[in-house]
Image: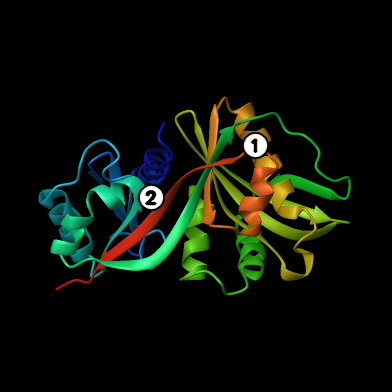
Amino acid sequence: MNGARAEAAFWAAFLHNRSVDAATAADGAVAVAGGYALFVGATAIDLTIGAGSTRALRAEDCEVVEEFFGDRGAPARFELDLDVFVRDRGLFEDRGYIDEGVELAVLETATTPARPVHPEIDVRRTSDRRGWIELAERAFDGGYPRLSRTLEANAAAGHALVIASVGGVEAGAAALGIAGDTAILYSAAVLPEYRRRGIHGALIAGRLGLAAARGTATAVLKTKQGSPVEHAAAKFGFNRTGLRRRLRRECP
């Protein structure tokens, strides 16, 4: 499955299947040209992902997205594969979208059985969602938009939450999602004092092992170009398969 479509399908399935209460009543997903417009209120997940992956985008696709986000008082936002961004750029310019200046690297590899990375680093699954959120919040160190609510959604959606420990001290956290035969590795962060010690790599290896055990064939993650995450992922066979750009249009 195309990485963007897999990521969009993962979040759409979560939104379609979650329990709804007063705080989540506006959350939802709507299909758009191979992807989904996603809204998880006041989080970094309020995006349209995978749109245009099956055909060229049209004005009516933008209208669907704009109405979807506009009904929720939010700007219409797209995260587009670079080839889609280039192909359909004129449409977005005509409709008044602006480039957010965010360019993300998309990395993919085949899933593989778990293998040890460093004898001092232990990676384990956890069912303590609150503990995972608190660790991840400290690890992201304020560098993530709308952090608390985003991590709550990330934890609720994940098929597996993992924690890395060094000498018995929890040092990093990450999440794994599954869509069809594709594993989505996301929300990985390491406490500042433990960075550059191989923990990102251990979190990647641990999640690849969990994904392989669930029968997935491919794993995908996205990160800023040239980031430590990209360098760590390259050691586990990840190759850059694309770039993504983000566009937005404010509500009228």
Judged by depth in the image, the label closer to the viewer, 2 or 1, is 1
The structure's colour scheme is rainbow
* 170, above or below 148, in the image: above
Q: Residue at 75% across / 46% down in the picture?
A: 123
Could you tell me residue 215's position as x and y percent?
A: 57, 24
Could you tell me residue 43's position as x and y percent?
A: 41, 65
Residue type, label 1:
Gly
**Residue carrying label 2:** 19
Q: Is residue 222 left or right of residue 14?
A: right
Q: Residue at 66% across / 66% down in the picture?
A: 139
- Callout 1: helix, strand or loop? loop
Could you tell me residue 117's position as x and y percent?
A: 80, 42
Give the crowd class for mark 2: few <14, some 14-19, many >=20 residues within 10 Å: few
The answer to which of 217 and 98 lies nearer the viewer is: 98
Residue 248 makes an appearance in the image: yes
Residue type, label 2:
Ser
Q: Earlier in the sequence, mark 2 or mark 1?
A: 2
- Callout 2: helix, strand or loop? loop
**Residue carrying label 1:** 237
Quadrant position of residue 8: top left
For marks 2 and 1, give the CA distance.
37 Å
The answer to which of 121 and 57 lies nearer the viewer is: 57
Q: Is residue 59 left or right of residue 38?
A: left
Residue 205: which numbered mark, if any?
A: none
Residue 43 makes an appearance in the image: no
